[in-house]
Amino acid sequence: MKLESIVFYPILTICLEAILDDTGKHAFVLDEKHSFNGQLCFDTLSDSLLGVGGFKTAHIAHLLLQPTAPTSLGSLPQHMIVLKQPYFRGESTTNRVYKCYVLVQELPILFQEANILYWAKSLLKMMYEYIDDAIHHATDLPTLDWIADIPCLHFVEAGLVLVYATTPKGTSATSTGSVTGAYLLEERINGKFTKFIHNIQYSSCLKPDNDGFCIVEFLIFTQHIQYIKTDGLAYISDYQGMSGLLPSMVTNSVGGGVDIFHKGNVEIGVECFEQEHVCNHYCSWPGFGLKPFERVDISEHAV
């Protein structure tokens, strides 16, 4: 078990307008004004392994901030969280080996992963504001039963943590900038983990008789709002989790030609969205003002 001195940088929720209007906010950055000093207790050996994704491992860890954060991660004295670390597959003839990157390779990957949550939180905030405003102004339309049952979802609280070397006297060497490691920390999702929508797919992973199908229908609708409100720039895909969600981004370039989303971004999803998205009862409610997309019969244009 390791106990390391750290600085924690939470991923804040920024208004989408601010992100789009300010090039300095197009990507997540380390903000000292919103950082917290503390310690991280963790073990990256197999005993603490929660799972392995496509390119990150997940371990149980405990975050101890001094003083504790007012809300979110680090607001508890020994806050149990999920520690995620990028990996690549090593060579082995007997079993899978998950190799860690060196820090100089790892940091860009972690920032790209943070950008996915940074943008996803902003898009979700915009979407709920759009819904609330539409319902508020739809005074001439009948109130439908499902409006009272709109799911209240959020993306996992998360942040980047930088690990610092400890001096011979046992004090943190944060002032010298001696960073020795970095990790992505996330809120732990308890309960059954559900895949709602796959990346580059536009329909539900669940059948209509599944308890989570109503959430999938709502998430498909949110993609329609996000696509329209960003002028076809971006929407959230690969929804998974419970009421706390984990996202992937599907975007056209938003970083001045720089890849700010790593492997979580698949641009072809944006290009095909209007052709593949199927509107549901949320999209069709007049109060939201969403028009169905005109589908093109590809066979008619085939040579």
Image (cartoon, rainbow, N blue to C red):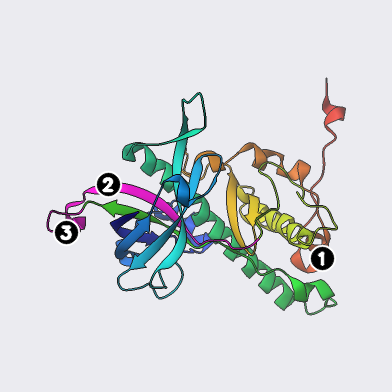
- Quick one: 52 or 11, which is closer to the camera? 52
Q: Position of residue 26 (x, y in %)?
A: 45, 51
Mark nearer the viewer, 3 or 1: 3
Residue that carries the numbered disc 1 in the rendered image: 285
Evaluate whether residue 31 shows in this view: no
Q: Quadrant of the N terminus?
A: bottom left
Q: Amino acid at mark 1?
A: Trp
Q: Which residues are magenta?
A: 166-191
The reply, left or right, for residue 67 in relation to residue 87 is left
Taking the view exactly as shown, the residue that stands out farthest to the left is: 169
Q: Position of residue 73 (x, y in %)?
A: 44, 66
Q: Amino acid at mark 2?
A: Thr
Mark nearer the viewer, 1 or 2: 2
| Residue 168 is covered by the magenta coloring | yes
| Residue 156 is covered by the magenta coloring | no
The reply, left or right, for residue 70 in relation to residue 214 is left
The reply, left or right, for residue 194 in relation to residue 190 is right
What residue is shown at x 49% (from left), y 64% (from top)? 13
Q: CA distance from mark 3 to mark 1?
A: 62 Å
- Quick one: 201 or 142, which is closer to the camera? 201
Q: CA distance from mark 1 to mark 2?
A: 53 Å
Q: Amino acid at mark 3?
A: Gly
What residue is shown at x 73% (from left), y 74% (from top)? 135
Tell me if mark 3 has few (under 14), some (14-19) or many (20+) residues whose alpha carbon lies within 10 angstroms of its own. Answer: few
Q: Which mark sits nearer the N-terminus, 1 or 2?
A: 2
Q: Which mark is residue 180?
A: 2
Q: CA distance from mark 2 to mark 3?
A: 15 Å
Q: Which mark is residue 85?
A: none
Residue that carries the numbered disc 3 in the rendered image: 170
What residue is shown at x 45% (from left), y 64% (from top)? 80
Q: Quadrant of the C terminus?
A: top right
